[in-house]
Image (cartoon, rainbow, N blue to C red):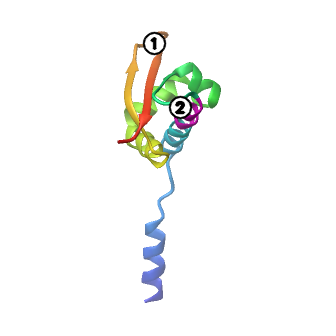
Amino acid sequence: MRAAAEKEKQMAYKPKSAAETKARDLGLALARIAEGAGLPASIGVDQVRRASPRLTPLAVGQMVRKERDTVEATLAERGLALVDYSDQGPGRGMEFCIDTAT
């Protein structure tokens, strides 16, 4: 009986992947910038990079494409929402529009 309870407890914990951690970092960086700039906020990838240097433009693009749910959930925890995201391609920039969640 005790072994079954212990096994269930171990199964409940799922460590976050590196991608999930970076996606959460992106969400937190976007939230900090938006809260500081006022809402709605248009945020460029350069602002994100200054707020969190480990978030390179390549990593930011990958996080939005692959872990968008995590980014949006992180923003939602702070009462914010990702209203729009545009990627103009390599060297032309990315932009996020953050506003209060409705």
Q: Answer with the quarter of the image where residue 86 lies.
A: top left
The answer to whether one can see residue 53 in this image is: no
What range of the chain is rendered magenta?
29-36
Which of the two labelled residues, at mark 2 and mark 1, occupies the earlier sequence position?
A: 2
Residue drawn 49% across the image and 46% down it: 78
The three-letter amino acid code for the residue at tag 1 is Pro
Percent coordinates x, y for residue 70 in the rendering: 43, 44
Percent coordinates x, y for residue 72 in the rendering: 41, 41
Number of the label disc, if any, that sits on residue 34: 2
Q: Nearer the viewer, residue 53 or 85?
A: 85
Q: Nearer the viewer, residue 68 or 3?
A: 68
Residue 85, placed above or below residue 35: above
Q: Answer with the quarter of the image where residue 88 lies.
A: top left
Q: Secondary structure at mark 2?
A: helix
> Would you name the residue on which mark 1 appears?
90
**Residue 17 painted magenta:** no
Percent coordinates x, y for residue 79 in the rendering: 45, 45
The answer to whether one can see residue 55 in this image is: yes
